[in-house]
Amino acid sequence: MLMRKVPGFVPASPWGLRLPQKFLFLLFLSGLVTLCFGALFLLPHSSRLKRLFLAPRTQQPGLEVVAEIAGHAPAREQEPPPNPAPAAPAPGEDDPSSRASPRRRKGGLRRTRPTGPREEATAARGNSIPASRPGDEGVSFRFDFNAFRSRLRHPVLGMRADESQEPQSRVRAQREKVKEMMQFAWQSYKRYAMGKNELRPLTKDGYEGNMFGGLSGATVIDSLDTLYLMELKEEFQEAKAWVEESFHLNVSGEASLFEVNIRYIGGLLSAFYLTGEEVFRIKAIRLGEKLLPAFNTPTGIPKGVVSFKSGSWGWATAGSSSILAEFGSLHLEFLHLTELSGNQVFAEKVRNIRKVLRKIEKPFGLYPNFLSPVSGNWVQHHVSVGGLGDSFYEYLIKSWLMSGKTDMEAKNMYYEALEAIETYLLNVSPGGLTYIAEWRGGILDHKMGHLACFSGGMIALGAEDAKEEKRAHYRELAAQITKTCHESYARSDTKLGPEAFWFNSGREAIATQLSESYYILRPEVVESYMYLWRQTHNPIYREWGWEVVLALEKYCRTEAGFSGIQDVYSSTPSHDNKQQSFFLAETLKRALAGGEISSFWQLNSIPRIKISTTQDRPRGKRN
């Protein structure tokens, strides 16, 4: 004890080290341990080492994760439906269940070697699906397609058992006619315009347009799911082969974010969920990555045009605006890009759009059609359920359904918007026709566009989940709006509907000028017929749908495909020389679905990805 009190005396440690030396040694040792331990989590291909220290994550197979991605707690796990359907093989191919596949944990991640551009086509045939993440080519993600398919309520193809015994000889003949029309439209496109975006049937050549930034084959990709569901096996394989061999993403033009999303990404996602073919998923993800620069705005609200060459967003002036129907019609596809890639950035982009829309003040609860992506303010108070606004509302109710009814934000936004629409835009004409007018700063335009005719089907679709006291009301409202849209067809000479129709000066459901009298093969009215038939089984909707089929055959069919017409009030109308890609993607599919018992509309937790009824059509600013 006395020795310790002697000044300057420092006893040696058991190791012969003095106190400063011990401190430096311990500091070095702790740094070394920290570096080694941290390296386990930083080095590539370290998932095995991670499992030594971290509890394994578990995840339900299939698409339940979409609800969590959307920012909502997933619903409690439900018992799988009895006798889940086996995965159906792609048309023209063997049953995938007969092919060997690597074993893996359900819903788990696996690390595999990166997939390069040259390997996309050969890697595309497996059901265990790797996807590269942007900036991390060494990390891959696997989606368990077989687990997803096992959770469907019904087989993808064919008829439901409870309806297959019905006497349907007439309906079957009608269905075969629609199928023949699809086959004719595809074969005409293949012969005269294969690889081009759309067919021009009068001049028998292809049309590229300037909306897609140099991307080609819009009709091919838009047609994939229709060809598959109609069991046109040879035609589907032709389309698939073109995607594998000729659909290239190394383009450098300026593209519409909205158009590329709904026609290309929507078409690819639909094809993937139907078939499990990896080429569709990889192409969708990589194309989605090319769209991300459009969101680089002060608010995160995307601009309408993105440059594939520079990665910048177009229309860079402070006074320009984004369109509600365009930036509001990304949610379905982008959530599934996250689901299929493991990359959260897609979901984050559309979550931010919701955040901005929830925060901004809305006049009388209405959503105007134009929003500044710079300031985050409405640019003008023009409200429409037709062009410029339409599919925003549709995506809300379908986001609710897609999430397995867990996305409460989407549900609340939809019913709040519908209540405002009913309060301020809904009208009944002197002749008793119910219509949704357009609103300009408090002044109503008493007209309804063809694009707005999707709303009958939308309201019918959402009636089931409304407040109990409103359900019957919404079903009746859906029927009345659909009746009005049918009248716009019935009052024309061709029995096809005009682009817009008015309710004034004693004239109802009729276009008042030639510039609104054209028909470009649009599907919205047939869409509503389909939904109302499915919900009510009232044969009138099948009859109305068949009337459209006959009119298409008589006035729109040409020697080399189908064409829109310039005046529905002329019994000898001129053609516009364009077979729109959405005619194959939607119009013919909806016409078939009025009689077809296609069960891919009956998924356990999600409607089909490319479910939008109005997403595939030109909106206001297009020619």
Image (cartoon, grey):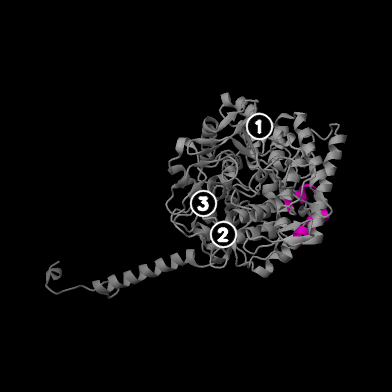
- Write down the residue under mark 3: 322
**For the residues marked 2 and 3, what is the alpha-carbon distance in whole angstroms?**
15 Å
Q: Tell me if mark 3 has few (under 14), some (14-19) or many (20+) residues whose alpha carbon lies within 10 angstroms of its own.
A: many
Where disc 3 sits, the SS reads: strand
Q: Three-letter amino acid code at disc 2?
A: Leu
Q: Amino acid at mark 3?
A: Ser
Q: Residue at x 65, y 68 (%)?
A: 117
The spot of residue 316 in percent (x, y) is: 48, 60
Q: Amino acid at mark 1?
A: Glu
Q: Secondary structure at mark 1?
A: strand
Asked whether residue 604 is in view, the answer is yes
Magenta range: 223-241
x and y percentages locating residue 62 in the rendered image: 63, 48
Residue on which the image places disc 2: 291
Quarter of the view holding residue 390: top right
Please, what is the dominant secondary structure of the magenta stretch?
helix
Reading the chain from its start, which is encountered first: label 2 or label 3?
Answer: 2
Residue 146 x, y percent position in the rendering: 70, 50
Q: Is residue 336 left or right of residue 192?
A: left
Q: Secondary structure at mark 2?
A: helix
